[in-house]
Amino acid sequence: MTLSHEEIRRRGDYRDLSIDGFDHETLKKLYYFMLRLRRCELALIDEYHPADEMRCPIHFCVGQEAVPASLSLLLKHDDYLFTHHRSHGYYLAKGAPMNELFAELYGKASGANGGKAGSQDISHPQSRVYGGAILAGALGIAVGAGFGIQLKNTSQIAVTGSGEAATEEGIFWEAINFASVKKLPVVFVCENNRYSTHSPQENRQPPGNISSRVAAFGVRTETLFGNDVIKVYAALKKAVERARAGEGPTFVEAFTYRWNGHVGPENDDHIGYRTADEIEFWKRNCPIALLERQLFDQGVLSQADKEKMSAEIDEEIADAFAFAKASPFPEDADWRRLNLSPSTPLADRLLKDDASAQFDQNQQYAIPGPY
Ligand SMILES: Cc1ncc(C[n+]2csc(CCOP(=O)(O)OP(=O)(O)O)c2C)c(N)n1
Ligand SMILES: [Mg+2]
């Protein structure tokens, strides 16, 4: 069945989210994570201007909370998560600390990467989550990690999150191909939010689901409405279990929508690339609201529970801002030690030696010869 943004809207407001049979603890955790991520992003948006103390571009993920929330419950500490520029949800999903995220956005030494990566390249190696601005680059790295896991024969898995535009990069298909051939323990999650910057998918790709094209490589696929966190959780759970059991990769295409502009807290709707109706539809069908309605209706959560959770989250956010603002900027000397990983000095030295040998060799060629 072909699912698309047009088809989702044609069907009208979503009424199929069902929490029947789901244990209440899991439901509350999913809800809490989404609320935490949403409030965190909204607080950053609020704070960005006019203070202008965060100086890095930020690709906010408001509206796209369901995938990270699901991953937050399914991944273990030893699993790897490689993601793209819209990174905050994935970062928090892997249990990386909020205060180091905020400090990173402020360019502070106490940030996850010493203030040198910013939002879109943020990583937290201790939590095994790695962001990256090179579109689809994360897939190649995830497949490499998956291959390593397979060779070591551990029960870990590698997960990679990307947008639908990642499929316009060659490495996307190389990664899918290799993962399929080697039956790697990799889960590919694609958050299809229709747009690459300001271009809709139908102007960039042929019709039909990305998952059908991926399935042609022999990879198992799932296509779903990505704002139904229960469906997303169930699909990713199956994918994670398959990967852990050595049954190979799965590709999950989750249709969702970003509320904010492509980048930065600024709105970019004045460009006219999307309609007010479309934005309103997706706001009405917000992943948090869809779950919340069911939780309230069925007595799993009350308005008072929500307020308690919000207060706790807001305290964490306030602490993260205070930590970021009070932290010092990196020292000049730190910039000379740009290698953030303590585990690669040998590789660095070999590369450096090789580069200087190459340089010497090139100098010889540069001297005019007899001919
Ligand atoms: C290799 C490469 N090409 C181009 C870009 C510029 N770029 C940054 S984000 C983006 C759009 C990405 O769209 P999508 O993958 O759908 O993710 P979304 O922003 O919608 O979450 C582009 C083209 C890049 N970062 N890397
Ligand atoms: Mg997109």
Image (tube, rainbow, N blue to C red):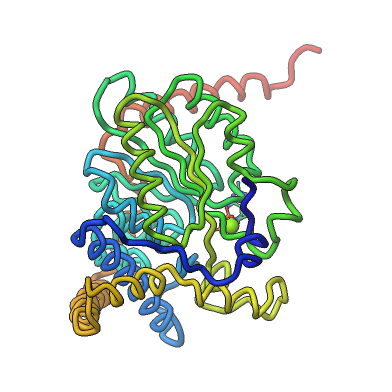
User: Vertically, is 302 above or below 245?
Assistant: below
Number of marks in the rendered image:
0
Figure quadrant of the C terminus = top right
Q: Is any part of residue 222 visible from this angle? A: yes
Extreme bottom residue here?
50
Q: Position of residue 186 (x, y in %)?
A: 40, 34
Extreme right residue here?
371
Q: Is any part of residue 56 visible from this angle? A: no
Q: Position of residue 243 (x, y in %)?
A: 35, 31
User: Vertically, is 234 above or below 144?
Assistant: below
In the depicted view, which residue is nearer to us: 290 or 268?
Answer: 290
In the depicted view, which residue is nearer to us: 68 or 5?
Answer: 5
Q: Is residue 100 left or right of residue 248?
A: left
Q: Residue at x 52, y 61 (%)?
A: 256
Q: Is residue 125 left or right of residue 370?
A: left
Q: Residue at x 39, y 41 (%)?
A: 159
User: Vertically, is 249 above or below 126?
Assistant: above
In the depicted view, which residue is nearer to us: 119 or 358?
Answer: 119
In the depicted view, which residue is nearer to us: 233 or 15?
Answer: 15
Q: Position of residue 209 (x, y in %)?
A: 64, 45
Snapshot quadrant of residue 144: top left
Figure quadrant of the N terminus = top right
User: Vertically, is 257 above or below 132?
Assistant: below
Q: Is residue 163 left or right of residue 87?
A: right
Q: Position of residue 170 (x, y in %)?
A: 63, 35
Q: Residue at x 53, y 47 (%)?
A: 223
- Ligand 1 positioned in quadrant: bottom right
Q: Residue at x 28, y 47 (%)?
A: 74
Snapshot quadrant of residue 208: top right
